[in-house]
């Protein structure tokens, strides 16, 4: 009989993207509590072990609801992380023992990415502290959470190439072309001329110009637009070819 079987548990971890008023891409991080570890070193991705009667997708939805208080969010499973050493740090082992009180030899996580309008109220039922962090200012995180974040960026870039309508999940209901341009540029890492981008956007029937323009801005006030999902579904065109 093979004696190499160990106590292996399955978890979900969620990378939640948001786009802030300074036109920066952000992710949500939560705080864990470990004695003798400074508070600024206790941030992590939101996650959980799955329950015995729970599908992994259901677990991810539960984690997001506990995190944000929002019942319906765009969610995409993108990779399993199963390195035997991903939970070998002593601080991580100590936290798992306190959090779950199980004899966990190894933990495998199924990673998800999700999209949230940053102006939505975050009403967490599980975490005392939930913070948005600019993607380029994410600190060193426990386990392999930095790796998960990096790979989620690769995944979301693939996603917008096949269905760019998901980008509007990050924008306010009314937005400027510059906001759309800056978000698309930061996600895709493509260098696009903004004039050509504006011209391309103007040709899409599902990006609707509004009568309203910006107010109280130091630059020339820009027109607001909205995205019409019904028109998009009838006429699906890639944003930038």
Image: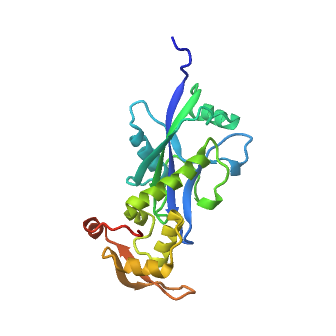
Estimate the x, y position of residue 211 in percent, counting from the top left: 36, 86
Residue at screen point 44% across, 53% down: 69
Estimate the x, y position of residue 31 in percent, counting from the top left: 61, 48
Quarter residue 232 falls in: bottom left
Quarter residue 74 falls in: bottom left
Most foreground residue, 146 or 213: 146
Q: Is residue 70 above or below residue 50?
A: below
**For residue 133, side relative to residue 1 (left or right):** right
Residue at screen point 34% across, 79% down: 203
Residue at screen point 49% across, 87% down: 221
Can you see residue 101?
no
Residue at screen point 51% across, 52% down: 152
Most foreground residue, 31 or 168: 168
Estimate the x, y position of residue 55 in percent, counting from the top left: 38, 37
List the single residue furthest toward the bottom.
220
Can you see residue 159?
yes
List the single residue furthest toward the front.
241
Position of the C terminus, as image quadrant, is bottom left
Q: Is residue 128 above or below residue 187?
A: above
Estimate the x, y position of residue 187 in percent, counting from the top left: 51, 63
Q: Is residue 62 above or below residue 219?
A: above
Name the image colouring. rainbow
């Amino acid at each position: 009989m093979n004696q190499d079987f160990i106590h292996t548990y399955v978890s979900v971890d969620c990378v939640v993207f948001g786009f802030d008023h300074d036109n920066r891409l952000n992710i949500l991080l939560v705080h864990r509590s470990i004695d003798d570890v400074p508070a600024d070193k206790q941030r992590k991705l939101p996650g959980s072990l799955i329950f015995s009667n729970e599908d992994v997708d259901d677990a991810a939805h539960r984690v997001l609801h506990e995190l944000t208080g929002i019942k319906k969010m765009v969610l995409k499973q993108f990779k399993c992380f199963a390195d035997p050493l991903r939970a070998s740090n002593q601080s991580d082992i100590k936290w798992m023992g306190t959090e779950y009180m199980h004899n966990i030899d190894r933990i495998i996580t199924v990673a998800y990415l999700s999209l949230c309008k940053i102006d939505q109220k975050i009403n967490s039922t599980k975490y005392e502290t939930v913070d948005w962090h600019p993607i380029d200012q994410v600190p060193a995180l426990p386990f392999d959470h930095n790796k998960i974040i990096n790979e989620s960026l690769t995944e979301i870039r693939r996603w917008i190439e096949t269905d760019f309508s998901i980008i509007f999940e990050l924008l306010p209901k009314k937005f400027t072309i510059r906001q759309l341009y800056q978000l698309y540029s930061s996600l895709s890492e493509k260098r696009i001329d903004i004039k050509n981008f504006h011209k391309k956007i103007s040709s899409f029937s599902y990006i609707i110009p509004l009568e309203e323009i910006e107010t109280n801005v130091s630059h020339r006030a820009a027109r607001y637009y909205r995205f019409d999902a019904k028109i998009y579904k009838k006429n699906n065109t890639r944003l930038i070819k």
